[in-house]
Amino acid sequence: MTKRIQMRKVGVSLPDILAFGFLFGSFVAVVAVGRNWAAPVSALPPIDLSLSSLPYAFFLSFSRIVLAYIFCLFTSLAVGYWAAHSRLAEVILVPVIDIGQSIPVLTFLPGLVLTFLALFPESRTGLEIAAILTLYTGMAWNLMLAFYGSIKTIPREYTETIRSYGYGPLGILLRLELPYAMNAIVWNSMLSVASGWFFLTVCESYKLGDRSFSLVGLGSFMALAADKADYVAIAAGAGLMVVVLVLSDFLVWNPLLRWAERFQRMAPVNEDEDEERVFNFFAKSKRITNFIRTMRRRYAVKFYVNHRRGRRGRNYSAQFRNLGYAALAVASLLTVWGLFGAVEMISGLSMVEWREIVFSAIWTLLRVVVVVALSGVIMVPFGLWLGMRRGPVVKRVQPVIQVIAAFPAPMIFPLFTVLFIHFNIPLSVGSIFLMMMCAQWHLLFNVISGAASVPENLVEVARTSGMGTFDILRRVYLPGTYAQIVTGLITAAGGAWNGCIVAEHVVFRGQAHTTPGLGAYITRATETTNFAGLMASVCVMIVLIVILNRVFWAKLYHVAETKYRLDG
């Protein structure tokens, strides 16, 4: 009783203590990560499969995921906003995003490792930055497309209304565009983090020529456990992964999704609706709530409103436009320089190697088409069904989906390979199943976020007009989520291209199981430092992706923007 009275006198509550503990723990974690980065690169510690080493390995992997996601979030919002508001940037950036999400992360790894090892030859900083940027290449693209697609489909009357109140570009971004896209941002953030976990084994354990690199982490732990067929270590790593994913869903993603739903509502919130426990717990702290209110009062009007008290605020649109043109010019020069370097690098390839690359690309392209088609047939109806139910159904199913989607599937790919061998299933067919595990969640998450953002008043109008469930699905939910379905299909195709490197080349018990395809070729080229073959395979993949983008995906996006948008 005495302690409780003393805590009340000084105004300290349990949420305050936990918030302080989180800040202090974050500071300790930053120090620990810095010490690991500063260690000499020549003394990389061996991967320990003892269970006592598992918590520290997970901590290092988690730090890489967090840093990659923070960088991913800010750059994705900036690029998506730029592409949505500049026609020139849109023409250039959207195909670049489509290409970037489809290029397997392993193709970025050799260049990043060699570059940052040259910049930081003495410490592990170079390897750590290369791992984080490689994770970033597997996380950012779907978030860029989701934010871009959300801005492009905002109803025109929303934009006209907020401009009539005197809001400038920053105010429109903070008051309309970010809230409107928040549901898609949260769902695609979950997907980005899941993609980071997915490619963890590739980024932490790899081989370049005669050198092997293994950073201490959960990915390298599971890769070594699979290579040695240590089922106890595999089970321990998988169990820890499941526990962490469940906790992150309860503490982070579910509260954020409940918060994001408030921006999508076109009807009042029901009084009997459950409140979010995590947010309400910290809202009990007067220190936290007062800090948030003070920041809002101090900066809301300053940042949101363009015209205040008869004064016209400074317009930065021209400066940002010039900055954008300068960035595009620099990017164009770098692209031209890179093209000359690529042509010089691949000019020495023989016709036999070109033939192998082209046929490998055709095999992988056929698998990607099958994977996208199967994912669409399965995940679009499932996502729409979940979106139509909303409320309790999604709350029960969403944690399960999040855990399954975020679980690093390459960690258990070797076990699937054993099943394929046991049932005499060739890897050329089994790789389609493995690639679906890489691709289908991109589509499902986008469909759910799109269905959840369909205004409830439109559904009520459809019901009162006598429509049945199937008609509401066909005439309300399907058109309302068309843009998100297109985004999901594009990112699913990118996930399938990305997943080919781990689906077409699987190692178990020291034996490599491969099937003809571009992913298997890229893996071999990386291991043997065949940079000419690696560059040629990337060029062939880019040509295929650009053709698909111009012939197919761009037309679907145009239909989404012009026909299926919720204008009044």
Image: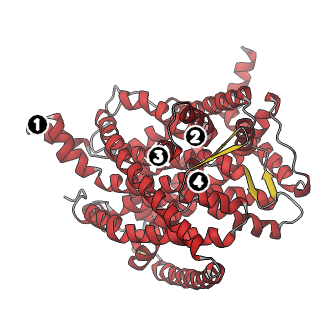
Q: Which residue is mark 2?
A: 409
Q: Name the disc covering residue 501, or none.
A: 4
In the image, taking residue 171 as reference, residue 196 lies left or right, namely right
Q: In front here: 27 or 325?
A: 325
Query: Mark 2 or mark 4, which is nearer the start of the sequence?
Result: 2
Where residue 440 appears, as percent x and y from the top left, is 43, 45
Query: Mark 3 or mark 2, which is nearer the start of the sequence?
Result: 2
Query: Which residue is at a point 71% across and 14% down the rendered structure image?
Result: 1
Foreground disc of the pair 2, 3: 3
Label 3 sits on what residue type? Answer: Ile
Q: Which residue is mark 3?
A: 432
The residue sitting at the top extreme is: 1
Label 2 sits on what residue type? Answer: Ala
Foreground disc of the pair 3, 1: 3
Badge 3: few (under 14), some or many (20 or more) residues near its Cα, within 10 Å?
many
- Would residue 510 be seen by someone viewing this image from the given angle? yes
Badge 2: few (under 14), some or many (20 or more) residues near its Cα, within 10 Å?
many
Badge 1: few (under 14), some or many (20 or more) residues near its Cα, within 10 Å?
few
Helix, strand or loop under label 2: helix
